[in-house]
Image: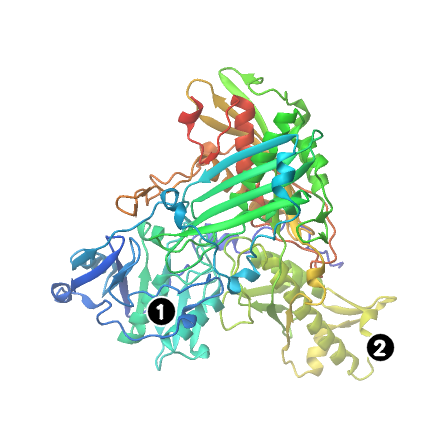
């Protein structure tokens, strides 16, 4: 039987049945004997000190085991760096219950541990806390005089600062035929994964822990726990096979993990701590950001001057930054640029990477500004992008490893029917609805970092692949299985991918669209190393026809080793195991970019987005009728899971443009809509015809698989495309996200 390659095939998620039947277990669902429950107590003031915290009456309640506060918290690591993690920005990482100081509203200040969750939650409301309040500032717009450049740290490697100025922006801008000067803003957004944040800690004795954690990085959580609590790394096991949504909120260890481990070690008991929905609004957010763009272009539409400044929110203790302003010059080859990014420290918790951090923010301002140029010059917005098309990233003066953005424009426009657009604003109507067409470009980094994987083949010819990588719902389990199956020449049902366990080979946090490009090559390399071991053992079998053959002369197919030029000669791999006394054969290998060559080219994934909106002329309500996203992302391992990722990003883009906004009362310093009833997200009735086009792109530079990530690219171009379509429909340019319909009445 001929082995049919699975890469490129729309294989359904291998864990799908477990999820839809409720069989998949999440961090807060594992059945554990003798389990205690912790409930976090949060500060009700924004800044100040705890004068007293009286837990005496609560401790007398039936079923209460202990109440931890800053007064009786067990000692933990002293140095700041021991609290850092793979995604920590420069600054001082927050240490829960370190002292009596309150740094932000909702700060965890106590943990009630009880025999039941309900008892712990009830007791938490009965603790008597006296505060000494201080003045605080939480409003970005009213504190711009405090803005400054962010500090540099290890995070700068993945989040580089803006490039240095080029040419003479001010002169070129003033001399430009068209000058566009625009101000943008978007409000706070919060991650709202369906699964609550939970950590179940099993105390196995002698400071040895097994932890089921909701995380996007098992080894990241393992390192954090070991460093903070002074444990040996080998004595901390973090497991997270199923994650009910992450979107960036699990990139850093959240404080429920700290609390659960602290209580478990102190009480020498099994402990679970789960955050409720409101408490999940206290663990990070996409920061509100203000942007200022000034683009200059000649009479033909060629952009020759680019100014882009972003000012974002951060906490008082960490300098959180995003890549907001770098994208414009990566797309459009202006020779005169001035790009700036500043932050304003406020009395809030540190912002946290949220799907396409910085990209979905910056591309909105960039692509709306480009749309303004197009209308000013009466040039088709698509044509304007083609006029300013570049095969190189002029900001780094490097050629792209691959760039099929031109075909994204052309194929996306054809699929959408862009040529049917009447260019005049307010010229297209459908009943009492104004109809608008809008488009925008998307770009995201195509990065990879270090990862490892192990391949184990047993005597029955089946293979297990191991990696500590998580699968946050992106299809990682399925595509890694596909990669391994094709590399080993096996049907997919003969390969098992085991993952999300910190005892497995190293994998980084899952985010930034680099997981497939990082772990995929590691899986590929481990399988190649396994094949070489099998081949070597096959050569050593007495009388083997492979004795004088070279490895590159053989292929592995359906459990046989076959000579390429003599297909009739094949060796059953089971014979290798028979000669090996039936013992499993394993190989561990790693993959990382070549530091000598990897930086020689720019690497990115691109998209072109086209949308149609209807705006009710009397009510101002907005409905996205249809959208097409054309994506160039190298080789697509699984079109089904990849399309799902793009569709999810498109929906989030709709949400960012039209729905999502967390309201912070600056008199209280508190988020007022910390629930899914008032924090608006799209529902089924908001989502209509969404289509994805994958543009063929061959990239032999990014990695041996030729793959680029698709997790972020689906979302970055949607907000500007939508607001551009709203302008086409109404003639009104909206610069604030989300778009409030009353501005269109």
User: What mark, if any, has residue 545 been given in the picture?
Assistant: 2
Nearest the camera: 515 or 53?
53
Where residue 63 sits: x, y (%)? Answer: 18, 65
Horizontal side, residue 700 vs residue 672: left or right: right
Nearest the camera: 734 or 516?
734
The residue wearing badge 1 is 201
View extreme (front): residue: 171
Rendered image quadrant of residue 681: top left
For mark 1, give the secondary structure: strand
Q: Residue at x 49, y 70 (%)?
A: 502
Where residue 328 sits: x, y (%)? Answer: 61, 44
Horizontal side, residue 312 vs residue 565: left or right: left
Count every numbered label the image shows and give the total: 2
> Going from the N terminus, do you reach mark 2 or mark 1 first?
1
Image colouring: rainbow
Where residue 639 sits: x, y (%)? Answer: 64, 47
Horizontal side, residue 20 vs residue 496: left or right: left
Q: Residue at x 40, y 78 (%)?
A: 231
Residue 689 visible in the shown view: no
Residue 124 visible in the shown view: yes
Q: Residues within 10 Å of mark 1 (few under 14, many from 20)?
A: many
């Amino acid at each position: 039987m001929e082995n049919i390659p699975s890469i490129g095939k729309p294989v359904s998620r291998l864990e799908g049945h477990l999820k839809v039947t409720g069989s998949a277990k999440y961090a807060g669902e594992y059945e554990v004997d003798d389990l205690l429950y912790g409930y976090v107590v949060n500060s009700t003031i924004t800044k100040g000190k705890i004068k007293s915290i009286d837990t005496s009456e609560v401790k007398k309640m039936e079923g209460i085991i202990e109440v931890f506060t800053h007064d009786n918290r067990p000692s933990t690591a002293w140095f700041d760096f021991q609290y850092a993690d793979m995604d920590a920005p420069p600054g001082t990482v927050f240490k829960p219950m370190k002292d009596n100081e309150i740094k932000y509203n909702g700060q965890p200040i106590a943990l009630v541990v009880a025999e039941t969750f309900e008892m712990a939650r009830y007791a938490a409301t009965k603790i008597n806390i006296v505060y000494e309040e201080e003045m605080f500032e939480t409003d970005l717009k009213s504190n711009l005089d405090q803005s400054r450049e962010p500090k540099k740290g290890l995070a700068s490697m993945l989040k580089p600062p803006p490039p240095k100025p080029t040419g003479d922006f001010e002169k070129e801008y003033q001399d430009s035929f068209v000058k566009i000067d625009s101000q943008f803003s978007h409000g706070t957004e919060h991650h709202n994964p369906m699964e609550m944040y939970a950590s179940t800690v099993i105390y196995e004795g002698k400071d040895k822990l097994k932890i089921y954690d909701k995380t996007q990085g098992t080894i990241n959580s393992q390192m954090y726990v070991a460093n903070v609590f002074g444990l040996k790394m080998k004595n901390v096991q973090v497991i997270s096979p199923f994650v009910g949504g992450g979107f960036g909120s699990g990139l850093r260890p959240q404080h429920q993990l700290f609390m659960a481990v602290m209580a478990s070690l102190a009480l020498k008991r099994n402990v679970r701590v789960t955050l409720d929905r409101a408490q999940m609004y206290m663990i990070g957010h996409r920061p509100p950001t203000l942007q200022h763009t000034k683009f200059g272009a000649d009479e033909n539409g060629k952009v020759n001057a680019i100014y882009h400044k972003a000012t974002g929110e951060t906490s008082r203790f960490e300098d959180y930054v995003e890549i907001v302003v770098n994208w414009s010059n990566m797309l459009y080859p202006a020779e005169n640029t001035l790009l700036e990014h500043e932050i304003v420290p406020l009395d809030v918790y540190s912002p946290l990477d949220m799907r396409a951090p910085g990209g979905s923010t910056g591309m909105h301002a960039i692509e709306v500004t480009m749309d303004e140029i197009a209308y000013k010059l009466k040039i088709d917005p698509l044509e304007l992008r083609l006029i300013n098309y570049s095969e190189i990233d002029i900001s780094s003066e490097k050629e792209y490893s691959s760039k099929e953005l031109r075909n994204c424009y052309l194929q996306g426009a054809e699929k959408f029917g862009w040529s049917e657009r009447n260019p005049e604003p307010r010229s297209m109507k459908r009943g009492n609805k104004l109809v608008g067409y809008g488009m925008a470009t998307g770009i995201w980094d195509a990065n990879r970092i270090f990862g490892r994987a192990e391949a184990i083949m047993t005597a029955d010819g089946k293979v297990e692949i191991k990696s500590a990588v998580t699968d946050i719902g992106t299809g990682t389990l399925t595509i890694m299985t596909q990669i391994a199956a094709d590399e080993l020449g096996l049907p997919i049902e003969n390969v098992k991918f085991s993952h999300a366990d910190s005892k497995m080979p190293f994998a980084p946090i899952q985010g930034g669209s680099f997981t497939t490009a990082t772990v995929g090559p590691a899986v590929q390399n481990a399988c190649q190393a396994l094949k070489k071991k099998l081949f070597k053992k096959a050569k050593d079998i007495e009388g083997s026809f492979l004795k004088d053959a070279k490895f590159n002369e053989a292929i592995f197919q359906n459990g046989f080793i076959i000579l390429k030029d003599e297909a009739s000669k094949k060796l059953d791999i089971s014979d290798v195991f028979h000669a090996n006394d039936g013992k499993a054969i394993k190989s561990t290998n790693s993959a990382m970019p070549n530091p000598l060559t990897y930086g020689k080219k720019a690497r990115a994934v691109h998209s072109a987005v086209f949308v149609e909106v209807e705006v009710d002329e009397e009510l101002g309500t907005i409905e996205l009728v249809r959208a097409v996203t054309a994506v160039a992302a190298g080789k697509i391992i699984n079109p089904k899971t990849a399309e799902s990722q793009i569709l999810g990003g498109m929906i989030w883009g709709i949400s960012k443009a039209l729905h999502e906004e967390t309201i912070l009362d600056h008199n209280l310093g508190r988020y007022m809509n910390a629930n899914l009833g008032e924090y608006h997200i799209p529902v089924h009735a908001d989502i209509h015809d969404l289509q994805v086009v994958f543009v063929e792109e061959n990239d032999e530079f990014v990695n041996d698989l030729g793959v680029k990530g698709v997790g972020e690219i689906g979302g970055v171009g949607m907000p500007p495309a939508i607001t551009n379509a709203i302008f086409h429909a109404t003639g009104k340019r909206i610069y604030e996200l989300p778009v409030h319909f009353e501005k269109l009445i």
